[in-house]
Amino acid sequence: MGQNRQKLLSSNDMQASIDRSSPLPFYHQLKLILLEEIERQECQPGDRMPGDHELCVRYGVSRTVVRQTLAELEAEGVIERIKGRGTFFAKPKTAEGLVQSLTGLYEDVAARGGHLRSEVRKLAVVPADAQIAADLQIEQGDPVTEVERLRYVDDEPWVLTITHVPVDLAPGLVDEVLTDQSLYAVLENKYGVRLVRGRRSVEAAAASAPLARSLGLPKGAPVLVLRSVSLGESDRPVESFVAFHRGDRSRFEVELHRSSAPARPLVVVTG
């Protein structure tokens, strides 16, 4: 966690105070004060926050107020609390538009100036199981190219993806080098497979032991599971994937527009 510097408000600093005549709740005032100080002091990921007791004393508020403030900052990804070690400024989460637009992670990260590389763990032709066959609308046992990649954003493990593509659509895909290039770009530029639309869903899950080791997380840590089926120009499914994103490093953003058309029913999947 960096050098564990405690940068927020040395005791000699001029500091804002809680306005006890304001209608704003104390926890919200404290949150705004801390956010302003974080920006002013140019706090970096890994810098240590003062402890709960110190914040209580500095701002003359109860521990309940401090805990509610820190809980909101943690939920917003500003800080992270590590049991037995303290509270630290968190690395910013990567905001991904993968739910609402048919882009791959490679394009999404590159658009923000980041660097994505992949550790290709498996690249082989395998028979489609029942679920993959249903997703791709092919017969069970038909050959598909399976691509398993551990993706790194700026050299930190970020997401594990498992992709399947029908062999007849990209017969040479198994020989491609996918360490530093976009799979979607290869499909479109080399094999003429243009992705037009798709279906994507996101759900929360707990990391299994093998997944946790891959992503550098403790077992049971939260992950975001993105499932997708992409369709081509003839409305044929051309790719399916499941991606396990680190919950502490990712968030998905969706842009919403109000429409006069009848709303689609909410679909709740259980089990």
Image (cartoon, rainbow, N blue to C red):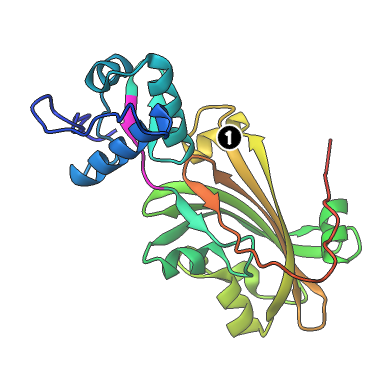
**Res 166 visible:** no
**Res 115 visible:** yes
Quarter of the image that includes the C terminus: top right
> Residue 78 location, x and y as percent?
38, 40
What's the magenta region?
87-92
Q: Is residue 9 above or below residue 265?
A: above
The foreground one among 36 and 141 is 36
> Residue 105 location, x and y as percent?
53, 62
Is residue 188 a member of the stretch shown in magenta? no
Decide: few, some or many residues near mark 1? Use Cα within 10 Å; few <14, some 14-19, many ≥20.
some
Which residue is farthest right? 139
Q: Residue at x 49, y 70 (%)?
A: 181
Q: Residue at x 46, y 41 (%)?
A: 76
> Residue 144 location, x and y as percent?
76, 64
The foreground one among 62 and 183 is 62
The foreground one among 127 and 13 is 13
Q: Is residue 83 left or right of residue 142?
A: left
Q: Is residue 75 above or below residue 174?
A: above
Q: Is residue 208 above or below residue 144?
A: above
Q: Is residue 106 above or below residue 86?
A: below
Q: Amino acid at mark 1?
A: Pro
Q: Residue at x 34, y 29 (%)?
A: 21
Which residue is farthest left? 12
**What residue did someone put label 1 on?**
222
The foreground one among 207 and 251 is 251
